[in-house]
Amino acid sequence: MIMKLDSPIAFLGTDAPIKSLMFYEEVLGLKLLEDGPFALVFQVGTIPLRIQKVEQWNPVQGTAFGWNVDDIYRTIDELTPKGVEMERYPHFEQDEHGVWQTPDGARVAWFKDPIGNLLSLTQS
């Protein structure tokens, strides 16, 4: 019998839990479910995002977590006044907002949390 794997949990890490708490709760507006000794847990849609509290965190290369959004430009306009800056990459043609259009027409932008985890926004 094959297991049913349909309730994902997302994981990130932080060595600065207070900064992460403020960013994910206040800047991104996620609902905090738990601030425990081992992790911050936020509700993201229907899944929990566990940000593990560790002594030293080295962010992974590449995008660690992302969101599908209805309007990428409106989302960027809401995040920018809160201090969020879109990342720029020389190998992508990005517009003035930092948005890259994929060959299939999706729009993608990236930004980092205070710890350096690379996050993304995608409008399909």
Image (cartoon, rainbow, N blue to C red):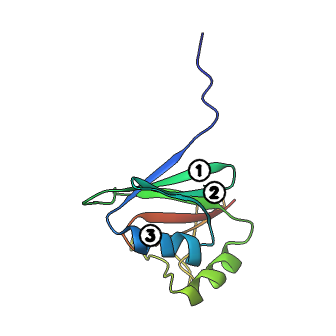
Instruction: Tell me if label 2 and label 3 are in contact, CB under 8 Å.
Output: no
Q: Amino acid at mark 1?
A: Pro
To which quarter of the image does residue 2 belong? Answer: top right
Q: Which mark is residue 24?
A: none
Q: Name the element at disc 3.
A: helix
Rendered image: mark on residue 44: 2
> Element type at marker 1?
strand
CA separation in Å, label 1 and label 3: 15 Å
Task: Report if the CB atoms under discs 1 and 2 are less than 8 Å apart.
Answer: yes
Residue 120 point in image, percent of width and height: 53, 64
Q: Residue at x 39, y 67 (%)?
A: 17
Which amino acid lies under the numbered mark 3 shown in the image of this protein? Ser
Q: Earlier in the sequence, mark 1 or mark 3?
A: 3
Of callouts 2 and 3, which one flags the residue occurring earlier in the amino acid sequence?
3
The answer to whether residue 113 is visible is no
Per the rendering, the mark at residue 48 is 1
Q: Which mark is residue 20?
A: 3
